Image (cartoon, rainbow, N blue to C red):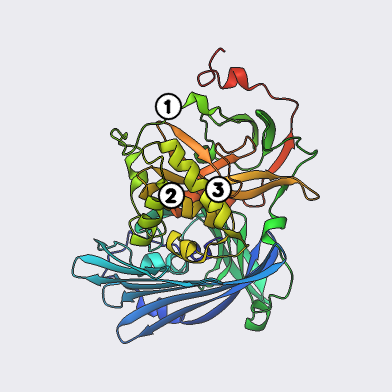
């Protein structure tokens, strides 16, 4: 699911922390209800609350989603509460919950002196980590609503900061007033500001429409997720059926023959692809043809091109070594995951490719495929052994790292044949065995087939780059593609 809480972004860094506009914040106190829409279809609701009490300013967002995934209704809740000191405006506490059909993940961070101490509980795994005190203030948390009180002109810009517990970092971005208009709302002329927000590190945009009194009427995240101000009863009505898997697939103009074993594939991709999602490697090539139109070539790599090193790995490049480390959702250092990895190394303990085969086959054969909107983590998946492509890849990534093999998640599209043939959003992974190799435990593929279109690599932070692409990519199949010239540096003359 898309993390709609990312829409809560900061505002101005130009005011001093002591300059807390309590008078204006008190005007904004109360609840606002929003319907949440994905590509025009309603998928949930969110209530935003602003409170001032006991020397603290509290901003709360409580978002609820109800969607269909392959015929099964799924419910998910994202809750965020940010607390600021009323005298300085500084961020002093964050409490966030992610509740999905299988579990609840919790993140709590509090200021202690000059440090920000965060406790997380993910998959029953507790973790503590501290960070420098964030620079975020209440000006950032209410960046749009407070800014309009100063009556900014079209073209005005402000920077903002936002500490995101799920990503374990403070993000920076820029807000800009892009338009100003007068509308009749409830019969009264109202000044409306259009504000564009951009976080470059995530290649993510949101566009908000805010009244001169600071009320956010609507906010759209990357053109796919939209919040619309509605009466509470209307906002909470999520009765329509919306299948996020089927609705966001890219149907093809003609079927692809032999998709899992074909040596080469040619496609035309149409959509808002940015430079950050144009990956070119031994598996695929994406080249720009014109505005929002791209040529894709994918191939089934030959394992003879690899010379897998023995375990333990002696020489790991500096840019690869981070993919050996555990993370909040990839708990490769947990005893249960380390023990399963030792077991799966089997008799071929030193052959890195053989170990990858063992892990991939075990995950494929032992996972029960179910579709669910959840915040996946490896430890929870190992315990329950069920889930979709996300859970398959999360578990294999953790097991590979625990076995001493660098691994990173991939996200993008893959071709699914049948009555509703097309490219569906999918997750798999890459392992480093001297070079990066794409593998897919959902299909038990080593290597992954040529229909895998990689658009993101890494953790949740990096995967957020595909949010603007959900439901906005079209795919057409070209004639037989020639991979020999395009991948000549990988394919031997023989």
Q: Residue at x 45, y 61 (%)?
A: 377
Q: Position of residue 453 (x, y in %)?
A: 60, 39
Residue 314 sits in which quadrant?
top left
Residue to which mark 2 is pinned: 344
Q: Farthest residue toward the top?
A: 493
Question: Which residue is identified by label 1?
Answer: 307
**CA gap, disc 1 and disc 2:** 21 Å
Visible in this render: residue 151?
A: no
Q: Which residue is mark 3?
A: 441
Q: Nearer the viewer, residue 194 or 484?
A: 484
Q: Quadrant of the C terminus?
A: top right
Residue at left offset 59%, top offset 57%: 388
Binning the other alpha carbons within 10 Å of mark 3 as few (below 14), some (14 to 19) or many (20 upward) gives many
Q: In screen coordinates, is 41 left or right of 442? A: right
Q: CA distance from mark 2 to mark 3?
A: 14 Å
Which one is earlier in the sequence, the residue at label 2 or at label 3? 2
């Amino acid at each position: 699911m898309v993390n709609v809480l990312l829409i809560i972004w900061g505002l101005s860094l130009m005011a001093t922390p002591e300059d807390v506009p309590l008078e204006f914040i008190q005007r904004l106190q109360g609840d606002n209800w929003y319907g949440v829409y994905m590509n025009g279809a309603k998928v949930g609701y969110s209530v935003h609350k602003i409170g001032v009490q006991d020397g603290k300013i509290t901003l709360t967002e409580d978002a609820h989603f109800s969607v269909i995934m392959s015929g099964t209704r799924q419910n998910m809740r994202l809750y965020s509460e940010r607390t600021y000191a009323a005298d300085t405006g500084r961020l002093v506490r964050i409490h966030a919950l992610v509740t999905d059909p299988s579990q609840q993940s919790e993140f709590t961070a509090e200021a202690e002196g000059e440090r920000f101490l965060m406790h997380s509980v993910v998959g029953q795994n507790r973790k503590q980590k501290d960070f420098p005190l964030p620079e975020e203030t209440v000006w950032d948390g209410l960046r749009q609503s407070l800014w309009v009180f100063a009556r900014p002109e079209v073209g005005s810009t402000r920077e903002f900061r936002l500490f995101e517990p799920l990503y374990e970092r403070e993000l920076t971005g820029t807000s800009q007033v892009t338009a100003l208009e007068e509308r009749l709302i409830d019969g009264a002329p109202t000044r409306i500001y259009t504000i564009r927000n951009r976080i470059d590190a995530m290649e993510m945009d949101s566009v908000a429409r805010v009244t001169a009194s600071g009320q956010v009427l609507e906010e759209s995240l990357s053109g796919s997720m939209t919040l619309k101000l509605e009466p509470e009863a209307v906002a909470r009505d999520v009765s329509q059926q919306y299948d996020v898997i089927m609705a966001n697939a890219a149907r093809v103009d003609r079927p692809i023959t032999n998709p899992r074993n074909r040596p080469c594939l040619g496609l035309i991709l149409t959509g808002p692809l940015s430079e950050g999602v144009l990956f070119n490697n031994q598996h695929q090539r994406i080249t720009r043809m014109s505005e929002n139109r791209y040529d894709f070539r994918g191939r089934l790599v030959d394992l003879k091109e690899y010379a897998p090193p023995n375990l333990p790995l002696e020489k790991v490049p500096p840019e690869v070594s981070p993919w050996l480390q555990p993370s909040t959702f990839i708990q490769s250092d947990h005893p249960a995951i380390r023990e399963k990895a030792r077991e799966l190394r089997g008799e071929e303990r030193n052959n890195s490719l053989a170990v990858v085969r063992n892990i991939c086959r075990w995950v494929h054969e032992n996972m029960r495929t179910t579709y669910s909107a959840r915040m996946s983590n490896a430890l929870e998946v190992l315990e329950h052994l069920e889930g979709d492509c996300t859970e398959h890849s999360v578990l294999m990534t953790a097991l590979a790292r625990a076995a001493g093999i660098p691994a990173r998640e991939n996200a993008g599209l893959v071709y699914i044949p049948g009555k509703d043939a097309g490219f569906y959003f999918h997750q798999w992974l890459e392992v480093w065995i001297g070079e990066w190799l794409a593998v897919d435990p959902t299909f038990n593929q080593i290597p992954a087939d040529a229909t895998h279109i990689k658009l993101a690599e890494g953790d949740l932070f990096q995967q957020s780059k595909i949010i603007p692409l959900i439901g906005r990519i079209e795919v057409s199949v070209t004639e037989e593609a020639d991979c020999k010239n395009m991948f000549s540096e990988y394919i031997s003359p023989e």
